[in-house]
Image (cartoon, helix red, strand yellow):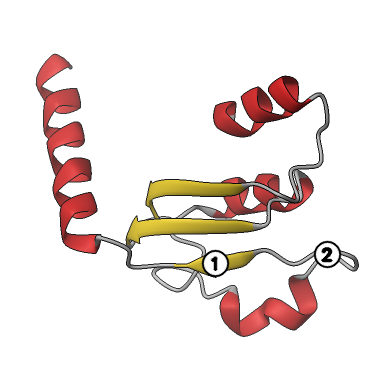
Amino acid sequence: MQAMRGAAAQLGNWRLQNCDLYVTMEPCLMCLATAQQFRLRSIVYGCPNDRLGAMGSRVDLQGLQEHLDHPFHRIEVFGGMLAEDCSQIVKIFFQQRRAKD
């Protein structure tokens, strides 16, 4: 959300149709809906999100794609890019976060 808002502010336009978002983990439903509203061209994610993933890990929006697409815009989604590396990054992040709590 912050990355999309920042990009929109930098570009002076909330439509990010020429922008691609690269994320470590598969987006959740809320993040995917936000990306749709900002009209992102594509999302590239690394590892699956078994708890909240919206592209097949938890909820399969890909199977419902024709019913959920924006009438004028479709986001391309590419998953599994450097999945092992991304999974390790996420694991370390949450270990460090739990250690702080």
Question: How many discs appear?
Answer: 2
Is the C terminus in the top left, top right, bottom left or bottom right quadrant?
top left
Position of residue 31 measured from the top left corner of the image (x, y, whole percent): 58, 46
Q: Which residue is mark 1?
A: 77
Q: Which image quadrant for residue 8?
A: top right
Q: For the point 41% across and 57% down, which residue is it?
A: 45
Position of residue 54 measured from the top left corner of the image (x, y, whole percent): 51, 63
Position of residue 79 measured from the top left corner of the image (x, y, whole percent): 41, 67
Camera-side residue of 50 and 40 = 40
**Which mark is nearer the camera, 2 or 1?**
1
Q: Secondary structure at mark 2?
A: loop
Q: For the point 50% across and 69% down, which residue is it?
A: 59
Compared to residue 71, the image places residue 40 above or below, namely: above
Q: Residues within 10 Å of mark 2 (few under 14, many from 20)?
A: some
Compared to residue 27, the image places residue 7 above or below, namely: above
77 vs 41, left or right, is left
Mark with earlier residue (2, 1): 2
Residue type marked 1: Val
Q: CA distance from mark 2 to mark 1?
A: 14 Å
Q: Which image quadrant for residue 96?
A: top left
Q: Which mark is residue 70?
A: 2
Q: For the point 52% across and 75% down, which residue is it?
A: 60
Q: Is residue 84 visible?
A: yes
Asked whether disc 2 touches disc 1, contact meaning CB atoms under 8 Å apart, the reply is no
Q: Secondary structure at mark 1?
A: strand
